Every structure is written in C-alpha cells, then in structure tokens.
Image (cartoon, rainbow, N blue to C red):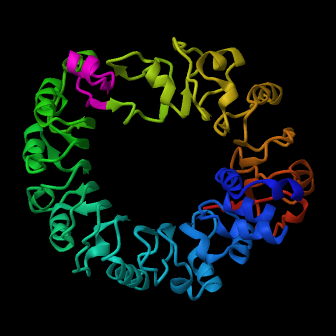
Amino acid sequence: MISFLEVLPTEILFEIFDYLTAFDILYALINLNRRINHIVELYPLQLDFQQISRLKFDFICRYMQPKQIISIYFSDEFMPDQVKLFNKYFPDFHDRFIYLKKIKFINTSTILSNLSINVSSLSIKTYLKTNNTDYFISKILNQQAQYLTFLKVDGSYVFRSINTSFPLLKHLIIDYCTITEFHRILHYFKSSLTHLNIFLDREDNLTILNFEHLSNSLIYLKINFSQEILISFELIKQYLQQLIKLKYLTIEATGTLDLMNGQLWEEYLFEREIKKFNFKFTLSNNFICHQDQNTLLQSFCSSFWIEKQHWYVACEKGEFKSSRPIIYSIPYFQPSLIFYSLNNNLPVTTTNKDIIFKYVNHLILTFYKTIILPNSLFTNVYSLTLLTSNLPSIDILQSIVNLKQIRDLDVSLIENISIDEFYILIDCMINLKNIKMQYNPLFIPPLHIHSYTLIPNDEETFVIDKNNIKKFSYLFFHIKNLEITIQSKDIIIPTSIFYSLFHILIKLFTFE
C-alpha cells in the first residue's frame, strides 16, 4: 500500500482525496511516511462537522494542520457544543487558520468570537438567543464587514446593533426579516448585491418594498412573502420595477387570483427579459376560486411557457370547489414529499406527469384496502412511510415505487405487523439502511441494517424493560444508530455490547 502511494504524483492523490472526507484522509494516511504526511498537509481540507461522532471530531482536531483548512461547517444537531470544543483545541484560532475562506454555524449554541480577515463567506444560525451569543455575532459581523462577499443569517435581529457598511458583499441571505428592517439593512450596508434571498414577514405598518439601493446591481432575487402579506401581480410589478438588471427571479407568495394568470406573467417576463422564473403562489383565504386545476393551468400552456422557455407548472387543489389552489413551477417547487392515497391525488401539470414521479424522494402511502395504481413508477424515492392498516402486498408496492431505492422505511403506525411478510419486504429493499417500527420481540433484525427507531406499541408495552434487556442486547448487537424507549431510568443499557454503536437516543416513558 505504501509503495503504491509512493509512485503516485501529488496531483493524482489530490484527485483521490476529493472523493474522501477529512476523517478518511487523515485516518488512512497520516503518519505513513514523511512524503505522504507532507502531501496530506498540502491538501486543502473542508471540514464538515454536521454529522460526526465525538471520536472522529477529536481525531480530526488532533491531526489536521490549521493552515490547510479552507472551510468549516459546525452543527450541534448531532454532536453538541462543537464550537466550544473546537475553541479548546484552537484557542488561537484567529492566528492559525490563515487560509480559512468559508465558515458555517448551523444550529449551534454559540459561534467563534474571532475570525481571520480571510473569511469571506459566513453563515450563522444559532438556537440559543443569549446575550452572550448575540454579542459574539455583532462583534464578528462588525469585524468581517469589510471582507465578506457572502453572508447568510437566520434573522435580521443580528443587524440591530450593526451600523457599518459591507462594501464587498455580493450575496445576502436573510431567513427572517420585515420590510422596514430590510430597508434599514440596505441603507447601512451600501452593498452592490448581485444575489438576494430573503423571507419577509408581516408588520403592523403597511410599508412598500423599495429596492432602490439595488437597482443597478441585483441580478438574482429569491423572495418569500409571509402568508399574512397579501400580494397581487400589480404589487410585484411595482416592487420590481427598480431592478433594471434583474434576470433570475424566484417568488413565493399568497395573494390574489391574478398571481395565477399565466398570460399576465408571460407579457411581464418577456418585457423584462427574465431568463429564469420560478414561483409558488397560493390563493389567499380572502378569496374563493371555483376553477379546477386544468382551467387554472390553461394560461400557462402557451408556446411561450411550453416550447420557448420549457417552463412547466403544476397545480394542487382540494376536492371542494372552494378549496384554495396552489400553483407552482416544476421541478423547482416540486414537493419532495407526497401523500399517495386511495384517490391517486397527484398534482395536475402542464407537462407529462413523469416529472412528478421523478422528483419525489419521500413517499407516504395511505390507503385502507384498495388503491388506484399509478401509470408510472416513483423511481427516486429514498424514504417510504406506510400509513396503512396492514402491510401492503409486495406486488402493490412494486407497482408504485422502486423498492430497491428505499433507504429509510417507516412502518411504525402499522399494528400487529406480520413478521414473515415484513422480512419479505426487507429482502426487496436491497439498499435499506434505517427502519422505524413498533418493537416486536419476535423480530430478529437483519445484520445488514444498522439503524433502528423502535417505539412502544401501546402505553403498557415498552421497548426495553428489565425482562428483555439481555435478549434485546443480543439481537441488536450490530447496530450503529438506535432510538428507543425504556421503562425506567434505572435500566442500564450495556452499550459496550453494541460494538458498532455510533449514536443512541434513549427516551424514558412517563405516565401523565
């Protein structure tokens, strides 16, 4: 192995590294020999800590070289307190990570208090809004204001104590903001933004959205209006008239029926020379629409939409005539999750429905005894949930979804599941990785499936109690990920038996 690596040029090794994680590179190659160590230390590493164990986190921190790190993603969702632990490893972070360009804080409890001036891309989303965290955020934004080209924040609150300009900023994403706050941000930033992605919430005072500060720079706009803001076609035209360089537009809004008029949009988009348009419009509760889906889609079936632009549209509407319609671009706003029920209630589209089947990743099947089978197969479903009274037959499932693609299976709402039939289903899912089910002591978990979420099948039956802990440990010795419910906090789970255990979540059942 070492001699083979010795003859490979650095460029080839770098190409191989591109397919590996930072942990894989360090764990496999560090300390093999001086040349390999030197090559590994030259390779620019991107650290993604979003789903990582404490063991791997510690290993990376011990063996990486700060000067080779170009990006870091922190997240407390899987492993808590990552930022605090990282700070302990690198208290002089600011001085050592001199080539760091990009950093993300994704649902972390805090952030690093000092960044290098080379950091030009920053994303912040924290789940603890403490005074200390807010102080660090304000401090970092003031420090980096002159250097940032990309900034993503979870709310405009982070800018309330910011009164400096961001002269180099080109790409701004704000997950939550009011129009008034947005105007204040533009006033202080003085940025020539080319990309803007923003969610605008309702405020008591009716304020007209003003893009004057971005009139000569903004090219890409993605804007999502709160459902409480009533939007019309004419209002959107008024908002966007100042953006003379706008070419790419994505809108999500609730409002009047003219939003769903394809002819109005066709004339406007042609006049403005918009290169790409994605939208999702929902009719406000203040209005009633008696038109069905096909009628609503007629204005989006012209040669402009279908032949020239190849922009396709879908429509969803309940069975009642007064149901609120939703109309949206596909595949951009194509829902990745679909409830497929007895009536085969899929969206109506301006193109072949195969596009619907192609982009669904999470399928929920809900029917009692019979179901109308689809004309096509859901080919890219990775997560399947069965909300059925019994386990459907293999033939029915195979006529709806490609079972070989399924990685996550949820049968937790099926009571008294047939174990033999369940084994047959599992055998058809050759890529199955995760199962969520009611605990059944008769179920012997297959060795190739390493992740289970086991729930009680009623209030009196627990996944683990003092009578079955030994049997459970024996059957599930091979698991990597486990979520379970226990009867008492006094129950000791011998985790050492689970030699591959990576993550465990234990819930204690308590009576109200």
Count all numbered tags in the image, as a single digit: 0
Q: Is residue 327 magenta?
A: yes
Side (left or right) of 121 relative to 449 = left
131 shown above or below 306: below
Residue nearest the observer in this picture, 17 or 306: 17
466 shown above or below 362: below
Side (left or right) of 111 relative to 269 = right
Residue nearest the observer in this picture, 372 or 82: 82
Residue under the point 74% across and 54% down: 481
Image location (x, y in percent) of residue 233:
12, 37
Tell me if I can see residue 81 in this picture: no
Quadrant hosting residue 490: bottom right
Image location (x, y in percent) of residue 338:
48, 31
Residue under the point 71% across and 55% down: 13
Residue nearest the observer in this picture, 58 or 372: 58
Side (left or right) of 199 relative to 132 = left
Residue under the point 36% across and 78% down: 144
Magenta residues, start to end: 302-328
Residue nearest the observer in this picture, 361 or 195: 195
Side (left or right) of 101 relative to 193 = right
Image location (x, y in percent) of residue 373:
55, 13
Quarter of the image with the N terminus in it: bottom right
Tell me if I can see residue 37 in this picture: yes
387 shown above or below 470: above
Q: Is residue 116 magenta?
A: no
